[in-house]
Image (cartoon, helix red, strand yellow):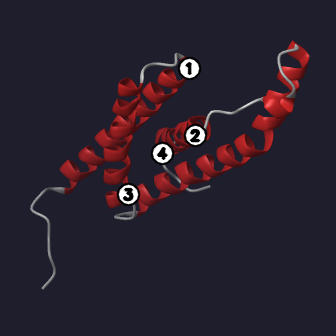
Amino acid sequence: MFKTSSVPAENRYAMFLTMVHLGAIATLLLIATLIFDLPGFVDGLPQGMLFVAIGAILYRKLRDDYVEDLWKAGISAAFVAIAVCFLFAPLALGLLGDMGGNAPWRDAEIAVQWPAAIAFLAFFAGFYRRMLSGGASR
């Protein structure tokens, strides 16, 4: 009646952690492609890696309390980072542009990829912080 997996729980958790590590590496690679303005075909590699990693993480996210706690820590950090990014990035860009004498703040542009990259970076930072602290809820 109930479907059980033939894969042991340790193997499923190891696959989950592998996807978390893959996602963290892909996020760092995505930020590197944004900083160094690499060609478009290189931009697709971290995006594809993130697509696979986040898909696997989402599939496993609420299977047990420990993983759910890690997920919540990562999502909370990503939410805070994206809120701060959207609130203060235009202000910082405008102030730096005005101080540098470049262009008025109205003409400055923020790359569309940066908020997503910052959210992913904060997600994995929150995830790893909770995982390294033992995953205990506070």
Which residue is labeled 1 in the image?
A: 35
Which residue is labeled 2 in the image?
A: 122
Which residue is labeled 3 in the image?
A: 58
How far, Cα to Cα, is label 1 from label 4?
Answer: 33 Å
Mark number displayed over residue 119: none
Amino acid type, label 3: Leu
Tag 4 or tag 2, which sits nearer the N-term? 2
Q: Is residue 83 left or right of residue 98?
A: left
Residue contact at pointers 1 and 4, CB within 8 angstroms:
no
Quarter occupied by the C terminus: bottom right
Mark 1 nearby-residue class (10 Å; few <14, some 14–19, many ≥20)? few
Amino acid type, label 2: Ala
Q: Is residue 132 left or right of residue 110?
A: left
How far, Cα to Cα, is label 3 from label 1?
Answer: 28 Å
Say above or below: 136 vs 38. Answer: below
Mark 3 nearby-residue class (10 Å; few <14, some 14–19, many ≥20)? few
Residue at position x 55%, y 53% in the image: 75
Residue contact at pointers 2 and 4, CB within 8 angstroms:
no
How many labels, in total? Answer: 4
Q: Secondary structure at mark 2?
A: helix
Measured from the top left, where is residue 81 in percent x and y?
66, 43
Q: Is residue 92 visible?
A: no
Tag 4 or tag 1, which sits nearer the N-term? 1
Q: Secondary structure at mark 3?
A: helix
Residue contact at pointers 1 and 2, CB within 8 angstroms:
no
Which residue is labeled 4 in the image?
A: 134
